[in-house]
Each structure stands twice: as C-alpha cells, then as structure tokens.
Amino acid sequence: MSQSAFFAFMVFRVGYRWFTSVFRAAPTGVVPLLMGGVLLTTVGCEVLPKGDAQAQRPPGQGESEEAVSVETAIAQTGALDEPLEYTGTTEPVRLVSLRSQAEGRLLDLNVDVGDTVTEGVVVGQLDDRLLLALLNQAQAELAARESEVAQAQAEVNDALAQVEQVRAELEQARADAERQQSLLDEGVTSEQDAERAQTQVRTAEQIVRSAEEQVRTRQQAVVAAQGRVEAQRSVVAEEQERRAYSLLVSPISGAVLERPTEPGNLVQPGDEVLRIGDFSAIKVMVQVSELELAGVRVGQPVQIRLDAFPAQTFRGQVTRIAPAADPTARLIPVEITMPNPGQQISSGLLARSQFQSEQAERVIIPETALEAAGEGDESTIFVVEGKGQDTKAIARSVQIGDRANGQVEILSGLEPGQAFIIRSSRPLKDNQPVRLSILSETQAE
C-alpha cells in the first residue's frame, strides 16, 4: 500500500465513523449532503498526493529512474581479525634505589615522595665526624711516610758523597803506587815501600766498592719508602671517598617514589634511603602465551590504551622478550617501552596493549555490500559519484580476499577514502541515481 493510499484510507475511516454518528442524529434531508462531502474528501485525499508526485518527476522519466535511497560508508584500511589485547601495569623505564655506602646517622633528607630530582644533586647528608677523624689519621700517616722517603733520600745523597771521597782517595793511592814503582825501578826506594803502596791501592778499591754498595742499599730504602707512601695515599683516597659517601647524591634524574627512612635514623651500608624512578619513558610488562609468541618480535610496534587517559592512544614498541617462560602458566614476559612526553604518565596505571600486525593493511568493507553480487574471488560493488541530484551508483568490479566477522578484504578495485554503498532500498544497476541517507551524508563529510 503506498503512502497516499494509506493516508486516504485513514481519512475515510475517520470520516466514516463521524458520518455514522451524524447520520443517526441528522434530519432526513441532510444525509445526502453529508455523504457527498465524505466522498469528495476521500477522493481528494487519494488523488492530490499522486498529482503532486507526478508533478515532481521530470517529464519522460519512468519509475525506474527514480533516485534510490542508499546507505554509504567510506572505505578504510584495517584487519579482519581483531588483535588480542594484553593488560599490564605502567612502570618507569628505570627504577633505582639510592642506598647508603657508609655507616652514620642521617642528618638531613631534603626531598620527599613525588619530588623531582636531577642526576648528581645532593639530596641528603650523613653524620661524617667519624669518617673525618679516620681521614685525618690517614693523612697524618701519609705525612710520616713521606718524611721517611725524604730521610732515605738524604742517606742516599750522603752515601754518594762518601763514594766520591773514597774514589778520590783511590786515585791518590794509585798515583802513589806508580811513583813508588818508578822509584823502585831506579833503585831509589825499597821494594817494601812499593808493596805498601800497592796494598793501599787495594784497600782504597775495597772502600770504594763498599761505599757504592751503601749507595745501592740507600736507594732501595728510598724505593721502599716511596712504595709505603703510595700505599698510604691509597688509604687517604679511600677515606676521602668514604667521607664523600656521607653526601647522598641522586644517581639519575627522575621522581622520588619511596622514602623508607627519616632524618635521625642510623643507616648502615646498603640501607635504602630513597627509590627514584626515571619517567622519561614508560615500560609495560605483559604476559604472552607460548602459542602467540611467534607473532611477537623485538622492535614490533604496539598500540597502548590507558584507562587513565581514555581519549588517547599511545604508541610503543617491544624492547625485550624474556628467554624463559613460566613453567606452570606457559606465559612469557614481554617488555614494551613507550615515550612519555611531559611525563604525564605515572606508575601503576592499567595499560591495555595490542601488538600491531606486520602484514600490510587492506581495505575492509562489510559483506552486505557484496550480498547482491554473489560469491567468488571477484565481485561487484557500487561506489558513489557525483553530488546532490547528480549522485549516482557506479558498478565496480573488485577482487575480494578473506572473510571474517561479517567483513571482507578488498584486494583491488577500491581505494581507501572512496564512498561505497552498503545497502539500498531496492536492487541497483550501473549509473543508477541514488539518494544518500542522513547517516551516509555525515560519513561522506
């Protein structure tokens, strides 16, 4: 039943009820007039809409050329299978514990949880009086060692002077011995005097050798003393470094996450004073089944959604895959790292991660767009061309791929961004005038 016929029927029904009620109460002469009015009203309701509809059609255009109401969509790329989603918790890219390296009472700790710190900045102070006393003692011992070196060097110098002296005496003894030998050859002196001169030469040579040995001994003493000095300098450097441990310095730049102790407490070497997180980037640990591990690789892009930021989508990548799985659950830990500009993402947030497929994305359309075209690797869809009253449905052959979840891949024949027809009020043909639905017009914009 057409819309105009339905409208006429409703008018006739209402008029009939009114006429019946009036007929029972009206005089006899009025009844024919009432019946004529109802008949004209009914006929007019049926005829006028048809006349208006005919007036709206272009001359010579049949019913087949009427614009068919269609619903369209914009072709977009995607994947048939929805990627699996893994949940994890956000963590700072680095988490460092600042621990005491010396024993002492904590005098000051000038940062608290939530404060930001910079690498190399002093954040606390230990009582260093005992360390300072040990450093002074080591420095005094070093001074004593250096004094021993100076004394040993002085003894070496004395021994060298003694060597020079006995060498001079040796030269004199040799000269005397040569003179006595010459006099003996001339018969001027006795053989006993010549032998005595030779004896003095040998004695002087022995004294020179002894003096030279004393020099070598003193030089070895200097080397030993210098070794003790170097050892003591190492002790002093160690004590200086231990005293430097009284200053608590931030090892990284980041935010303070925990403060386990307070000023006034006694801390031992190894005790944790602060826990600092580096939020320049964020990492998320997820557990991947061994059945899906083959589709995960280091460097693979990951899409991350945070419940704390529902309107944003973040991009990260796989930075590490654990070499061992949980023997009970057969799950492998996978580390995902993503940038954190402005450090807006904090620790402990729920993160939903999806590993992006490495396959090239294809145009995906609903299967309803192919229902009228039959089955097979090749099919026909209708795209929309033109605007306003010139909008037409153009048949186009496309090559289809896999199907899943009511969607189908288009391998060729349709490009992303093109408008195509999802469904129509009646079967279409090529170059068919169409009228877009309100929803379709919104999508086209």
Image: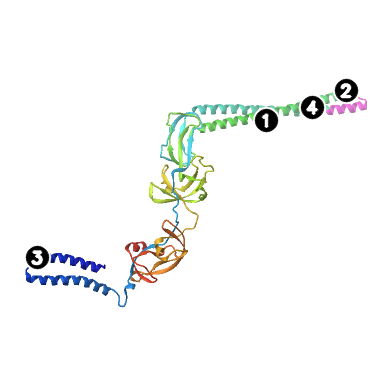
Q: Is residue 22 above or below residue 203?
A: below
Crowding at dot 4, Cα within 10 Å, few <14 / some 14-19 / many 20+, comes out as: some
Distance, label 1 to label 3, CA atoms, is 144 Å
Between circles 1 and 3, the one closer to the viewer is 3
Q: Is residue 292 above or below residue 17?
A: above
Nearer-N-terminus badge (3/4): 3
Task: Please identify the residue farthest to the top as the structure is shown.
Answer: 192
Q: Is residue 32 visible?
A: yes
The quadrant holding residue 189 is top right
What residue does disc 1 label? 223
The quadrant holding residue 146 is top right
Quadrant for the C terminus, please: bottom left
Distance, label 3 to label 2, CA atoms, is 190 Å
Task: Using the image as rendered, state which of residue 120 and residue 334 is in the foreground.
Answer: 334
Crowding at dot 3, Cα within 10 Å, few <14 / some 14-19 / many 20+, comes out as: few
Residue type, label 3: Arg
Checking the image for residue 193, the label placed there is: 2
* Magenta stretch in the rendered image: 174-189
Distance, label 4 to label 2, CA atoms, is 18 Å
Crowding at dot 1, Cα within 10 Å, few <14 / some 14-19 / many 20+, comes out as: some
Between circles 3 and 4, the one closer to the viewer is 3
**Mark 4 secondary-structure assignment:** helix
Q: Is residue 306 above or below residue 188?
A: below
Task: Using the image as rendered, state which of residue 438 and residue 269 is in the foreground.
Answer: 438
Residue type, label 1: Val
Nearer-N-terminus badge (3/2): 3
Task: Using the image as rendered, state which of residue 35 and residue 53 is in the foreground.
Answer: 35
User: Where is residue 80 drawn, in percent x and y?
Assistant: 44, 56
Nearer-N-terminus badge (4/2): 4
User: Where is residue 78 drawn, in percent x and y?
Assistant: 44, 57
User: Where is residue 241 drawn, in percent x and y?
Assistant: 54, 33
119 left or right of 441?
Answer: right
